[in-house]
Image: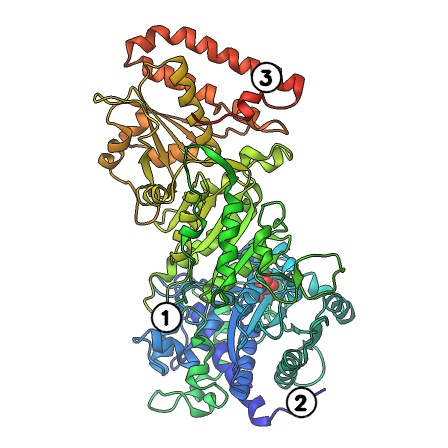
Amino acid sequence: MNLPVPTIAINWLKNHHRFTNFIAASSLYLKSNFVLAQTLTHDDIKPRILGHWGTVPGLNLIYGGLDFLTHQTGQSTLLITGPGHGAPAILANLFLEGSLSKYYPNLQHNQAGMEYLIKQFSWPKGFPSHTYPGLPGSIHEGGELGYSLGTAFGAAFNNPELLVAAVIGDGEFETGALAASWHSNKFLNPKTDGAVLPIVHVNGYKISNPTIIGTMSDEEITDYFKGLGYQPMIVSQYSEGDIYETWLQTLMEAYSQIKHVQETYIDGTKPQWPAIILRTKKGWTGPAFNHDQKLEDNNYSHGIPLKNPKTDVYELGLLKKWLKSYDIKEFFKSDGSIVDSLFDFIPEEKKLIGQNQNAQFSPPVELELPSLEHFEVTVESRGSKPDSELGGFSKYIREILKNPYNRDKFRVFSPDESESNMLESVLEVTNKPYLWPVREWDKHIGTSGNFMEILSEQTLQSWMQGYNMTGRHGVLISYEAFLSIIASQIDQYIKFLRQSFDFSWRAKVPSLNYIATSSVWRQDHNGFTHQNPILINSMLSKHVDFVSVYFPVDINSMLVTMETVFKDQNSVNLIIAGKTDMPQWLTLTEARKQMEEAVMVWGWIGNEDEDGPDVVLSSAGDYQTVETLAAIQLLRELCPELKIRYVNISSLSCMGFGCKNRVCKTENALNKVFTTDKQVIMNFHGYPEVIKQLVAGEPISMRMKILGYVEKGTTTTPFDMQVKNGTSRYHVAIEAIIAAGMVNTEVYWAQEGLITTLNALIEKHKAYIKEYGEDIPEIKHWKWQ
Ligand SMILES: Cc1ncc(C[n+]2csc(CCOP(=O)(O)OP(=O)(O)O)c2C)c(N)n1
């Protein structure tokens, strides 16, 4: 079907293309003589020519088309640009539509503003060469390729009025992350979610090579997309006809297909969303050759096509010819204003793509969180009522989702682990959305719901990012080891968030939350490959103050942690929480205090007198807290004269102990809990290097011994994991005895015998598990007394 497009619109798009291509091309090169009023000289060229050209003409065509679509339909349209290196195109379009001038008042919406923009691109303290939060309308950085499509779907979930156009580079198309996110169409409900329009920009080349999809025939591409469940629409500059006309026609056709899907969808059918595959020449309208080097329609136009016009006369001539071909002066009136006809199909201001309210312009809606008192586990005696933190949290989530108010603003993201991570109770009140047919015995799957499961951590992260950047809430729950698959993706999000703080017009976003469960210490059935706490290192290396890692120790502290992070904004939180049954230590009130203090002395454990302790034992992490407390109990029996203080650490941030706004930074604050002079033995959930890094250079580092996971893993008993890594109660007790021996003579004289006893217990453990295949009963059933 070829929908008629008025000639005036086709001509407008051609002019739009010429105008935006000129701005983008000259942004790479010019520091003066912007409209080429004088003869172009070497002096007009920027000293450092930086940026990317190849993708730009295609992006300009796409943006212009989307302007037309939005203008004609009044559709709320958000654009996600996969090739973030195409920023010159996005800047040119934001300039033309007036969004840039709105948020950068010194960048006027006229010829002077355009000149300022050209100069500022890739210029120190100006605009960077990639899309970033300084560009209004952008929620995606597009530097690390692969996440555009998933982010688009995330933005569309529970956003029925929205159309998200996602431009996917044909190089980006090859990434694993992008490949998996095509399946997002099986999770998008046409009635309750918005729409995503994927536009695969096949310009045939990456930096050095042809792209794979670029070498596929139309037939092969069609089969591929049909298999994925899309209705592919191929538009090609190489086909007959006017590409401008076909492009506008195709967009309108795709839009009417989207409307058709939304209006006619009935449960149980497979919605046939359109996907556009747009073939253009890479570097289209740029110089065709430099000497005998082919540039246009080749990978050599990916970055800077002409590299030496600053010094090379021939290249300067080519550049002049290239820039002059756009005839830019035609688009300005004598007073420097832009000719009216360029705005013929630019949407009205409130519909501008660069000002779509979903792109961090409106403050996020808050969740209605149930009172934690309903879920409190009463702690009559410390260490009683073994129960699962994740199980307790699951009931909390269930209540959040029982409230209809929350249902369209909160989703749980999980890589196929709802069962294994004890999250089933959430599924009593919601479903796992999935639209393709399943079998009658497949449980908890429906056409809509809040529990997103796909076995692709990158897709989940992209979904959650899109959902979050458009103001909604989420939590991604995964095996600890495999969360590090998305460590780099989380880094990119942190960078985007960090930069967004520089722009006051960017609204806050709800916190991004990760629960790492099935942790390193309890992978007894899986073993070494599943033992990896490296995400903690990665997140705590970011040098920002809004990234925190939490270590709840029981259900009440887990609840308080989750309430805190769900209320938090503009932050990234990793929560380390086991799923196996754990002793309950803290009342809800104590858990709240622990959250406030982050580093807290548990007075009910220690036996210090007015002279203070001989040694401070400390832990961060649920399983390590059990081991540390077990060590203390053992020491009480074996060496009652040893005076101990116990300190629990419930959160860490890049800035030190504690979390956002509650960081114990000063030596004084740390000395209060850790004493000024006693040895501190710390039993840490993750790699010891995390803590070493946090305390490096601080006086406390000189008296701190840090135990943690040292990459000793296998399929073995839970206690043997602790023994292997030197973090078991016996190891903690030995360290405590050695440390206390330096200040307590009684301990000093008893030290040798005690250590022999403890080493014998370690040997006994080793012999026992070898013979019986499980932990010694008194370890397995250990209880705090
Ligand atoms: C994950 C990732 N790997 C590698 C790169 C380096 N890189 C930048 S652009 C590019 C080629 C991209 O090609 P394509 O997606 O087709 O973009 P376009 O041709 O539209 O510029 C590569 C490999 C990157 N940015 N991200």
Q: Within 10 angstroms of label 1, few (less than 14), some, or many (20 or more) residues?
A: many
Q: Which residue is mark 2?
A: 3
Task: Give how far across and how far down residue 313 sits, in percent.
Answer: 47, 68
- Give the CA distance from mark 1 to mark 2: 41 Å
Q: Amino acid at mark 3?
A: Lys
Q: Which residue is mark 3?
A: 766
Task: Check the picture and name the quadrant holding the C terminus.
Answer: top left
- Give the CA distance from mark 2 to mark 3: 77 Å
Could you tell whether 81 is left or right of 209 in the image? left
Q: Within 10 angstroms of label 3, few (less than 14), some, or many (20 or more) residues?
A: some
Could you tell whether 530 is left or right of 36 in the image? right
Residue in view at x 57 percent, y 24 percent? 720
Q: Which residue is mark 1?
A: 119
Determine whether the residue tagged by mark 2 lies in a helix, strand or loop. loop
Q: Amino acid at mark 2?
A: Leu
The image quadrant where one finds ligand 1 is bottom right
Could you tell whether 113 is left or right of 55 in the image? left
Which is more toward the observer, 272 or 105?
272
Determine whether the residue tagged by mark 3 lies in a helix, strand or loop. helix
Residue in view at x 51 percent, y 28 percent? 710
Q: Within 10 angstroms of label 2, few (less than 14), some, or many (20 or more) residues?
A: some
Q: Amino acid at mark 1?
A: Lys
Task: Check the picture and name the quadrant holding the N terminus.
Answer: bottom right
Determine whether the residue tagged by mark 1 lies in a helix, strand or loop. helix
Residue in view at x 56 percent, y 58 percent? 145
Q: State if disc 2 and disc 1 touch (CB < 8 Å).
A: no
